Amino acid sequence: MFLKDENDWAGTAATISAAMVMMVQSGSLVMAGFFLEKTANSRRDEILAMPIDQEVADADARSAERAELYKEVTKWELLGGFTRMCLYVACGLMMASCYMVQLFSCFVP
């Protein structure tokens, strides 16, 4: 059905093409970042002179306040001993299950 099944070279050509596309896209990303940084630096005064949208500033302040509140109520020291033990055990079991799935052949092909 696929060209790869009929011709051996097609799989290699597809891999090479994918690698070339990745290089071009990576280069485009780097160039876009370069020109964004260059423009932001050269037009810094214009950007700083733009008025700040009050609704956005209020939303940012609310978000910062919520983040600070979240940080306060989720401190590790506030948890009881039983809750901490449950979290440690859950973490250990999750790591063990990931290792078991990766290292042991428990699935039949």
Image (cartoon, rainbow, N blue to C red):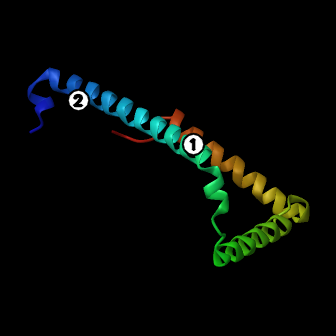
> What is the quadrant of the C terminus in the image?
top left
Where residue 49 sits in the image (x, y, percent)?
A: 66, 62
Where residue 31 sits in the image (x, y, percent)?
A: 46, 36
**What is the distance, in whole Å, between disc 2 and disc 1 at their CAs?**
35 Å
Residue type (three-letter) at the residue carrying disc 2: Ala
Q: Which of 92 and 55 is in front in this view?
A: 55
Lateral position of residue 27 relative to residue 1, left or right: right
Q: Residue beneath label 1, please?
A: 37
Q: What label does residue 14 carry, if any? A: 2
Q: Nearer the viewer, residue 41 or 7?
A: 41
Label 1 crowding class (10 Å Cα cut-off): few <14, some 14-19, many 20+?
Answer: few
Please tell me whether residue 38 is drawn above or below residue 53 in the rendered image: above
Q: What label does residue 76 carry, if any? A: none
Quarter assignment of residue 1: top left
Badge 2 marks a residue whose secondary structure is helix
Lateral position of residue 109 relative to residue 50, left or right: left
Badge 1 marks a residue whose secondary structure is helix
